[in-house]
Structures are given as structure tokens and as C-alpha cells.
Image (spheres, rainbow, N blue to C red):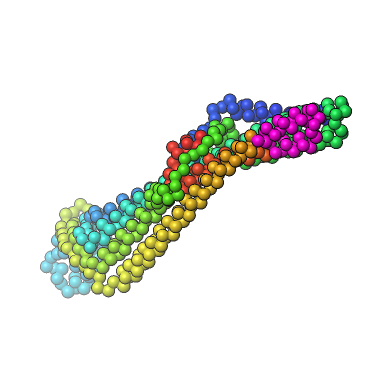
Amino acid sequence: MTSRINSALGLSLLLCAGRFVAAAQEPLTLRQAVDQALGQSPQTAISRADDQKFAATATLARTQLLPRLNFTEEISRGDDPVYAFGTRLRERQFTQNDFALNALNRPQPIGNFATRFSGSWTAFDSFKTQREIHRSDLLRTSASSSAKAVDQQIVLHVIEAYQSALYAQREIDVAQHEQETAAALLASTEDHVKAGLAVESDRMSAEVNVAARKEELIAAQGDLDLAWAELREAMGAPNLKATELKPIEPHTFTQLALDEEIATATKMRPDLTALSQTQSAQAVAVGAARSAFGPSVNAYGNWEEDRGSLDNSGGHNWVAGVQISIDILPVGKRAQLAQESAAKQRMDAQISASQQQVRLQVSRAHIHRQTAELTFVTARAAMDQSAESLRILKNRYAAGLATITDLLRAEDAERQSQAMYWKAVYNNAVAYAELLYATGTLTPEAAEDLQ
């Protein structure tokens, strides 16, 4: 009997010692956990990479406005009649003998070293390039908004994991207290049995109660380990050691009317903003596809030096011009326009569906928030009542006016009410965070209001 009590108390002391070591460290606050997640989470790295990608795409689109300049150094040799005739002309080495029929038909092999600068510039393309630049800018802005949406998802994930770890720690606190109470009750019951105030079955019930509380403590420790694993994943810190967490103080949160929250979500949700910007970009893409049907004006130029060897002087020539072109059979361009128009219609429908989904999410979060608030108030009252009921029954049992079954029943009710209360506390905080996320206002600064 004594060995069982000592074993149970030994486990409690071991867990308490582990918590004392953790308490000696600086508690990890919710804001610190959120900041670390935003700095180390793989999702953050992915969104940043996407932002850099669209920034590079916007820069690439602007390069279409710049002229293109090429340098070429070419070495060639051959006896093709046309090649030989043209090369001698470009090298300014053509003589009267080169008009001989045999020299024209069967020229000797000739070599050429050509240095060439060539350039081109699209002076006008019916504003297609300008529209593509505008589209790239909108897509880049959309990527930034999407990154903000990812940040809010990370913040919510961290808050949920942090609250789970806090609740698991509270479960251990309750389980330790209940185990100590069960051990004390067993000792008291043994004294009652020796004094003839209780029967042997009361002692056996107390032993069963001690064993049950021990199992609950072990299960609570497993829940805490799992909660910390989830918190490490949410923070993007797989090597983070378990430490003390700054507790969430039980309190209520302000809440607006549902219509106001929906209006806030419509304006503030970064994912809706990203979709709206993508929709605008797709509308510009349709305009760019239409611009492809218009005329284009291109300027070009070429300067070349040809010589028979590297150290010889040769001939110089240049060509410059302006080209106006119109596609009179734009079959491919029509297909491109149809494709962009269909994408625009799809984006319009997606915007409408997303707005409906956001309204539903806000409504669900609003109702969940109200329910969590009422549950929190009810659980607090139930915990106070169960604690008072247990106090009365302890006094009655000590006076021999109640059975151990009544006392165990009251202890079980008190334990359950404590668990329900702390679960309600953390559910209330998470519900508030979910409402902030649904309305698009869940920032790292807003997370501080939960603590």
C-alpha cells in the first residue's frame, strides 16, 4: 500500500521537478512564438520566393521597352560563288580580274573576319508591352497580398498550437493535484478503516482512485509532448526545447456586429485582395491580347567590318531602317485572345465564390466566438459550484455523514469542471483568433491581445 502511494508521489515529484527546471528559464510568450514562426516557417520562405519571382517577372517585362544590341565576331572560309563574291565586295577587295567567268564560277577559297554590331528597338506595338508591364506589376502586388495571407495562416496555426500546449500543461497541473488529493484520501481512508469508521471496500475504492489518477497524469504528459511537437512544427523550429509558456489570462474579448465583421473582411482579407489584383491583371492580359492585332513599328540597324585577316584593314558597311508590320492572318492571336477571355471569366466567377466563402467563414467564426464566450462563462460558474460541493462533501465525509463513493463522485465532478473550464478559456482565445483571421485582421500585434 505504502509503495503504491510512494510511487504515485514519486511520479508527481519528478514531473514537478521537470517543471521547476523549465520555470527557471524565461517563459516563451505567444508573440515570441509568432515572430519566430514568421521568420523560420517554410511557408514564409515559399511566399517570399514567390514574391521575388513575380518581382523578377515585372523587371523582365520592362526590358521589352529597351533596345536590343548584339555584338558578333565571325570567322568564315569557303569557295561558294555567292559567298566569295559577296565577301570580296564587303572586304572592299574586288578587282577587275574577279569578273572573269572562271573566277566567278570557280572562285578560290576565301576567308573572312567579320565584326558586327546589330540592334533593334520596338518603337510601337499598339501598347501591348505597356499592358504586359502593368499586368506584371499587378501580379507582383497580388503575390505580396498572398504572402500576407500566408502570414496570417501561420499566426493562427501558432496560436492554436500554443493554446493546445497551454491546455495540456493545465491538464498536468490538474492531474498532479488530483493525484495528490487521491493519495491523501487513501491515507485518510486507511485511518478510518483502522478506527472502524470505514469498511475495507472503501480502502479498495481509494486505491483504485489513486491508480486512475496516475493513469490520467501519464496520459496528460503524453498530450503535452504531442502539443509541443505541434508547436515546434507551427513555429518551424524542430529543435526547440520544451520550456515554460506564458499563460493566457482568462478574459472576454470585444466583438462587433456580424455585418460590420463581414464588411471588415471584404476590405481587409489579404486573400480576397490578392484575387482582386489577379482579376485586374487578367483584365489587362485580355487588353494585351487585343493589342497584338494592331500594327507594330520596329527600328533596326547594323554596322559591320569585314577583312581577310585579323591584322588587315577591310571594308565597313552599315544598314538602318524602320519596319511596319501587320498580321493579316492572326489565327493564333485570336486563339490567344479567346484563352485570355476565358481565364478572365473564370477569375470573375472565382472572385464571386471566394466572397461567398468569406462571408460564410466570418459567420461561422462569429457564431463560434459567441458560443465560446458563453461556454467560458458557464464553465467558470460550474467550476466554482463543483469546488464548493467538494468542500462540503469532504467535511461530511470527515464527520462520517457521507460515503467514499459520494466523495469520489464529487472529486470526479470537480476534476471534470476544472478541465472544462480551462478548455473553455483556451477555446475562447482560439475562437477570437479565428474571428480575427476570418476578418483579415490577425496580425502579430493582435496576437498580443490574447495574452
In x, y percent, where is residue 374? 56, 43
Q: Report which quarter residue 172 is drawn in.
A: top right
Residue located at (79% from left, 37% from top): 405
Question: In the drawing, does residue 357 fall left or right of residue 319?
Answer: right
- Give 129 or 419, whichever is nearer the viewer: 419
In x, y percent, where is residue 19? 63, 29
Residue located at (28% from left, 66% from top): 290
Find the residue positioned furthest to the front.
Answer: 401
Residue located at (19% from left, 65% from top): 323
Magenta stretch holds residue 160:
no
Q: Report which quarter residue 101 is drawn in.
A: bottom left
Question: In the drawing, does residue 379 fall left or right of residue 14?
Answer: left
Residue located at (78% from left, 30% from top): 397
In x, y percent, where is residue 188? 79, 27
Magenta stretch holds residue 396:
yes
User: In the picture shown, does residue 351 fall above or below 217?
Assistant: below
Q: Which residues are magenta?
A: 385-414
Find the residue positioned furthest to the left.
Answer: 96
